[in-house]
Image: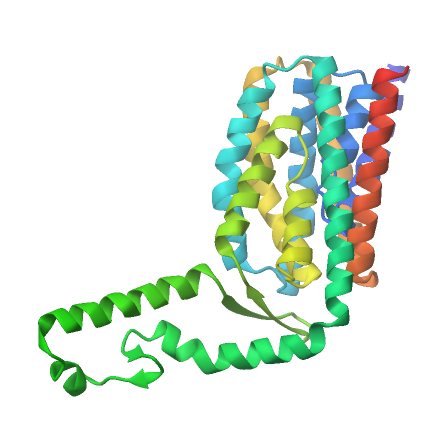
Amino acid sequence: MPNIIFIIIVLFITSISVGIIGNIIGIGGGILLVPFFLFYMHMPPLEASGLSLFTIVASTSGGSLKFIKEKIIDFKLFLMIVLFAVPAAIAGSILSKYINTDEFKGIFSFIIIIIGIFSLIATRMQTKRNIHSSHNHNNYNNSNEETDTSDINPRMHNGTVNNDENIETLSGTSNNIDLRLQSMIIYFKHISSNIKRKRIDRTGNRYDYYIKKPIAINLFSILAGFISGFIGIGIGGITGTFLTAVEQIPPRIAFSTIVLAMIFSSIAGGFIHLAYMKLSFKTIVYLIPLMVGAVIGSQLGAAISKLFKSRTLRLYQGWIIIVLGFLMFVISYFK
């Protein structure tokens, strides 16, 4: 009994810490939890990943409620992520059943090191881009404002309004069809490239930005979802970096939206793990302090995240992930 009580206390403190860190840097906490389960608790990979995903659900649920109240979640962006990440998380969770412990540790270390490097490189690229961004950004906004109407209005072609009378004077029905086809092409090109977004949070702060490549967001969500289900981590390490450094979406909007999306991808992956692993009374007992601590930590992390600059958040994310990956590699292969 004393041993169980000690473990419960350790799990509670650990989950609070992971909830704080995960919500500050947008990684969900799984990158920190899975190594803890593997090396300290000596759990098999399937159980470690499953517990991690359910803890992420608790952690992200608490943070998401706070972000929703603050009105900083972009729900259109959320759908672009979650509709692709959830099926991928299910596929990754199914595949994880066939990996043994040693293979899992090696794969986990490799994946999170790559994620960390990607985060750091993308952050440095963004920093260099910001040096020359002010003038280019103004030109970009002006050009989009001038062409928005012609792109999305099916009655406009080459910037000229065609009313019904003008369309009827075109040479034949084929010209009408050609005009409409061209307008449709322009419209679908518009929605597949730049989508202008605006958010105003509860305190009145305004965020203006573009979702530049929705298809790329879908693809990265598939990759992040698969890895999430496979090794039991959140989707924030990949999608968060891509959205902030490549898509240049404001970090608070990106991280908050990802935290909400992680609830659904983690539930999907977690239930697959739950179906495969043998639940014991001990596992259920472990879940209680993990989930309670994660909720508390997520609330603290969501509040603390306001104090950090966006570049600082991404640098922390990258370095924490890389260091952890190398530590896991060293412990696994040189113990």
- Name the quadrant of the C terminus: top right
Q: At which x and y percent is residue 29?
A: 74, 39
Q: At which x and y percent is residue 152?
A: 37, 72
Q: Is residue 148 above or below residue 1?
A: below
From the viewer's perspective, tell me whether residue 256 is left or right of residue 143.
Answer: right
Q: Is residue 98 above or below residue 34?
A: above
Quarter holding residue 289? top right
From the viewer's perspective, tell me whether residue 90 is left or right of residue 8.
Answer: left
Front residue of 331/147: it is 147
The residue positioned 79% from the left and 47% from the top of the image is 317
The residue positioned 77% from the left and 53% from the top of the image is 314
Q: Is residue 299 above or below residue 232?
A: below
Q: At which x and y percent is residue 61?
A: 64, 45
Tell me if residue 12 can be seen: no
Quarter holding residue 271? top right
The residue positioned 50% from the left and 55% from the top of the image is 214
Front residue of 322/293: it is 322
